[in-house]
Image: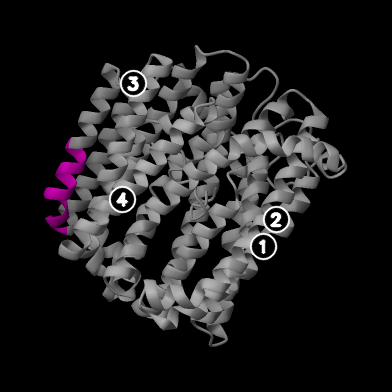
Amino acid sequence: MPDDAATGPDSPADSGDGDSDSPAGSGDDDSDTPAGSGDGDSPVAQLAAGAGTGVVGRLGSKALSLVIEVLLTQFLGPSRYGRYVLGKSVARIAQRLAQLGLTQGAVRYGSIHYEADDEDALAGVLTASLVLSAGAGVVAAAAVFALAGPLARSVFGDPALAAPLRWFAAAIPFYVLLEVVAAYFRAFKRIDREQLLTSGLRPVANLALVGGAFLLGYRLAGAVAGFVLTGALAAAVGLSLLLRVHNAPVGFRAGWAGARATARKLLVYSLPMMLVSMSFLVATRTDRLMLGALATSESVGVYNVAATVSLQFSVVISSLLAIFKPIIADVDENRDPERIPELYGVVAKWATYGTVALFVVVALYSARILSVFGPEFTAARDVLAVLPLMYVGGAVFGPCGALLAMTGRERIEVVNGVALVVLNLVGNYLLIPEYGALGAAVAVVLAGTVVNVVQVSLVYRFYGFHPFDPAHILRIAVTVAVVAGVVLVGQDLALVARTAACVALLAGIAGLFYVQIDPAERDLIAGVFAEE
C-alpha cells in the first residue's frame, strides 16, 4: 500500500497511530514506558498493542467524522458542501506541503533517539521540527489566502469559492503543528496519547463547534470556522501533552545550536518524504479537484460523500501502519532484518481481513448508507462500489510503501509518489468527461493498483521476500470472489437475503482467519482486546 495510505490529514495521521499501564487520558502522563512496549516486548507484541489502541481510537474517530459529514451535507446541501470540500482539499494540500515531510522525519529519528535514550539528539530533532513546521505553516497560509481569488475564478470557475478558501487558510499553521506533534507520540510509541489527541479531542471538538455554529444559524462560514478553531485547540493541547511525555521537554531547552545542527539531517530525510506524502495526498485529492475543474461543485459534493464513507476502510490499515513504521525503523537501525517479513506478514494479513469485512457491509448496504446524508447523495452508489477497492488492494499488497520509506529508501518512494500523481491526473482527465464521478473513482483505483504492484516488486528486490505465500494467495482469491459477488449480485438482493448474505460472508471471513491463526496473530488479538 502507498506509504501514506489512509494516514493523511483526513484520516488521523487522514489525517491520519500500545497500551500503557494506565488507560489513555488517565492522568499518568509522566510514565517513562512507551505504551505497549516494555523492554522485553517483541516487535510483534509492540505492533499488537499499538494496533489495538489504534483500531479502537480510530473506530470512534471515524464514527464521529461520519456524523460531522452528515451534518455538513444536511445543512449545506450539495453545492455549498462541494465548496467546503474543495476549500478543504486546497488547504490540506498546502498543509501537507508546509509539513516539509517532518512528520516522517519525526517518526524515524524520534523513535531512534528515544529508544537510545539520547536526550541531546532528541532535543535537537524536536526543536528543529517544531520551529520549521510552524514557520512553513504560516507561509503556506499566506500563500493560500493571497491566491484564493485566482484559484476560485480561473481554476474552479466558481467565484463564490474564494471566501471559503481564505477562511480555510487560517487553519493551515495549526494543523501542521498538530500533525508533527502527533508524529512524535507515534515515535515514542505513546499511541494512547496520539489517539486521545487525533481520534478523541479533534473530532469531538469539531462536532461541537460545527454543530454549535449550525444551531446559531451559520452555514458554510460556521462549518469552516469550526474546522479552524478545532485545529487551534488540538494543536495547543497536543503541545501541552508533548511536554509531559518522558524526554520530550528537553527538546525545548536544548538551545538553537543543537537544533540548527540537527535541522540539516532532518530535512535531508524529510524533504524527499514530503514529496512522497504530497504525491499521495495530491493523488487522492485529484479526483475531487478535477471534478471541480471539469464538472461542478455539486458533483464534487456528491462524490465526496462516497469518498468519506470509503475512507472508513482505512481504519485497520492506518492503525497497523502507525505502529509498524517506528518499529520497522528500530528493527532496521538495529540490523535485525529477519524480523521484517514476520511483521510485514502480520500487517498484510490483518489489513486484508479487516478491509474485506468492511467492504462486505458497506457494499451490501451502500444505498441505505448514502441516504443518511440526504436523498441527493444516493447518486454516488456506483462510486461507493468502486472507490473502496483502493483500500482493499492496499491491504492485500501489505505495507510496502511504509517499509521502503522507513528503511532508508525514501527517494524511491518519491518516484513512486510522482508516478501515482501522474497516473491519477491522466486517468481522471481521460475518464471524468465521459463517466463523471465514476470515472474519477476508477482512475484512483487503477493508479493505486499500479503503484502497489511496483512497490511490492521493489520489496522483493531489496529484501528478498513477498507476502504472496499460499495462505495469502488463498486470502486474495477469497477477496476477489467476495468483492465480485457483492458488487455483481449482492446489491440487487432483497433486504432479508442481503442481510443473510452479509452474515454468511462475515462468518466465512472469521472462519478463514480462525483456520489460519498462528502465534503472531494470538499476540495481536491480545493487543486488540487487552485493557480495552
Asked if marks 2 and 4 touch (Cβ < 8 Å), the reply is: no
Asked if marks 4 and 1 touch (Cβ < 8 Å), the reply is: no
Calculate the distance from the C-alpha at mark 1 to the C-alpha at mark 3.
51 Å
Image coords of residue 267 (percent x, y): 64, 39
Query: Which residue is disc 4 drawn over?
Result: 424
Query: Which residue is disc 1 drawn over?
Result: 138
Q: Does dot 2 land on a helix, a strand or a loop?
A: helix
Calculate the distance from the C-alpha at mark 4 to the C-alpha at mark 1.
29 Å
Query: Which residue is disc 3 drawn over?
Result: 516
Q: Dot 2 surroundings within 10 Å: few (below 14), some, or many (20 or more)? A: some
Look at 70% across and 56% down and name the residue there.
135
Q: Does dot 1 land on a helix, a strand or a loop?
A: helix
Q: Does dot 3 land on a helix, a strand or a loop?
A: helix
Q: Residue furthest bottom?
A: 217
Instruction: Give the amino acid at mark 1.
Output: Val
Query: Which residue is disc 2 drawn over?
Result: 134
Q: Dot 3 surroundings within 10 Å: few (below 14), some, or many (20 or more)? A: few
Q: Dot 1 surroundings within 10 Å: few (below 14), some, or many (20 or more)? A: some
Look at 52% across and 52% down and name the residue there.
15
Image coords of residue 109 (percent x, y): 67, 31
Instruction: Give the amino acid at mark 4.
Output: Asn
Quadrant of image for the N terminus: top left
Magenta stretch in the rendered image: 481-494
> Image height check: is 311 above or below 71?
above
Quadrant of image for the C terminus: top right
Q: Nearer the viewer, residue 240 or 88?
A: 88
Calculate the distance from the C-alpha at mark 2 to the C-alpha at mark 4.
31 Å
